[in-house]
Image (cartoon, helix red, strand yellow):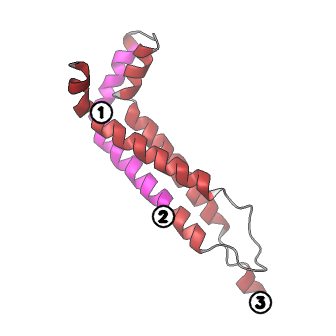
Amino acid sequence: MSMEETTTHEPNGDMAAKAATAGGLLGALAMTSCCILPLVLVSFGVGGVWIAQLTALYAYKWFTFSMAVLFIGYGFYRVAKAEKASCGEGAICARPVNRKLMRGSLWGASIVTAIAMIFPYLTPYILSY
């Protein structure tokens, strides 16, 4: 094997996958800021006028949803691409990233994003009991 063949692993792939995973997690947290986060804070006894201001973020729900979906989708793409381009025999590779942790984080962000999208529509049914 020549030297060119052994260095085919792209070190920026791990950084792109990490950045996409972090973006997906932050997008999922941003999705909860308008609806779920105020409810959780009030449940824990945190009060104040500033909690009511969080509901003003509801107007940006579709923007945060689209950004979260883009980051999560790109994160899944990068994780899958990195698994296919794993280091071969004799290749010089950077420190490998725990793909199971990244995949689990992306699935968790996907679930939180889905719950945050559905929650405003389910709230009247939950509160009616």
Indicate which label's residue lies in the foreground, 2 or 1.
Answer: 1
What's the residue at 34%, 49% (across, down)? 66
* Amino acid type at image mark 1: Phe
Q: Is residue 33 magenta?
A: no
Give the structural element (helix, strand or loop) at label 1. Answer: helix
What's the residue at 33%, 30% (across, down)? 57
Percent across and percent down for residue 37 are 41, 25
Q: Name the residue that disc number 2 marks.
A: 77
Residue 62 position (above or below residue 123): below
Q: Name the residue that disc number 3 marks.
A: 2
Count of numbered labels shown in the rendering? 3
First in sequence, mark 1 or 3: give its number. Answer: 3
Percent across and percent down for residue 8 are 67, 78
* Amino acid type at image mark 3: Ser
Residue sticking out furthest to the front: 129
Judge the density around disc 2: few (<14), some (14-19), many (≥20) Cα neighbours within 10 Å: few
> In the rendered image, is residue 64 in sight?
no
Indicate which label's residue lies in the foreground, 1 or 3.
Answer: 1
Q: Give, as a single range, the part of the protein colored magenta.
A: 50-77
Question: Quadrant of the rendered structure where residue 95 is?
Answer: bottom right
Percent across and percent down for residue 73 are 42, 58
Q: Main secondary structure of the magenta part?
A: helix
Question: Quadrant of the rendered structure where residue 100 is?
Answer: bottom right
Residue sticking out furthest to the bottom: 1
- Numbered mark located on residue 85 in the image: none
**Distance from the alpha carbon under mark 2 to that under mark 3:** 29 Å
Judge the density around disc 3: few (<14), some (14-19), many (≥20) Cα neighbours within 10 Å: few
Give the structural element (helix, strand or loop) at label 2. Answer: helix
